[in-house]
Amino acid sequence: MTMRVAKETVVSIEYTLKDDQGNIIDASGDRGPMEYLHGAQNIIPGLEQGVEGLEVGATKSVSVPPQLGYGEYSDKLLQRVPLNAFGANTPQLGMRFHAETNLGMRVLTIKQIEGEEVTLDGNHELAGKTLHFDIKVVAVRAAELTELAHGHPHQSGGCCGGGGCGSGESSSEGGCCSTGEASEGGCCSSEEGASAGGCCSTEQPVAQKQGGCGSGGCGCSA
Ligand SMILES: [Zn+2]
């Protein structure tokens, strides 16, 4: 019998993501299918709902409004910091990094640099946008118990590029991306926390919620 996408299944999908104008924003393409644990909020809610119930081989177009995607754009997520907060790093327009904010750990984008002042934007780059996905389900399988416990798939991918999550177990410490991320500042965290440390890969599949790597997605301590 054919397996359908449902809670507690690990799903692989190929997708192309377009904006309202039909411009391609992202595609699984060369990166290969995106694998996620269904029902565990690995991906944006609107997409997860759209995939629900599909079987292997199925294709579908799914349009996701901002409130089921990356939220509405909010000016409240803009903040200004002095240039010297970056220390030895040279901020550049569009640069992204993890940082602790009063809304918790977020990915911030450098939106403007003006004199000695840098404007950071905590909105997701796709905030406020309706997202149009063309998806194809390439695989569905039952999730392993450890995957359910961790809330993410382990084989062939995840944020840590294969390898799964090793020992995990009792740990606040273990886990694939480990190194004490959660409190410390994302997967690529660099020097001392607080200021604008860390880089964040811009290569993360956009359909994946932010923080796939680093802020809990792969923490295995979750
Ligand atoms: Zn894990």
Image (cartoon, rainbow, N blue to C red):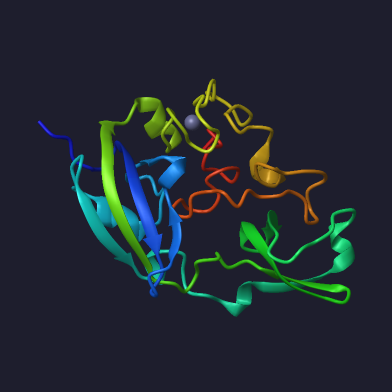
Residue 19 falls in image quadrant: bottom left
Instruction: Classify 45 as above or below 10.
Output: below
Identify the residue at horizontal 60%, vertical 52% (top origin). Answer: 202
| Residue 3 position in % (x across, y down) | 17, 35
Instruction: Classify 13 as above or below 108.
Output: above
| Residue 76 position in % (x across, y down) | 62, 76
Identify the residue at horizontal 72%, vertical 44% (top origin). Answer: 189
Quadrant including the N terminus: top left
Residue situated in front as seen by the camera: 77 or 47: 47
Instruction: Classify 25 as above or below 145.
Output: below
Residue situated in front as seen by the camera: 195 or 17: 17
Residue 107 falls in image quadrant: bottom right
| Residue 64 position in % (x across, y down) | 34, 66
State the count of labels.
Answer: 0
194 vs 154, left or right, is right
Residue situated in front as seen by the camera: 73 or 57: 57
Identify the residue at horizontal 56%, vertical 76% (top origin). Answer: 74
Quick one: which residue is furthest to the top in this view?
167
Quick one: which residue is furthest to the left in this view?
1
Instruction: Classify 147 as above or below 30.
Output: above
| Residue 6 position in % (x across, y down) | 23, 43
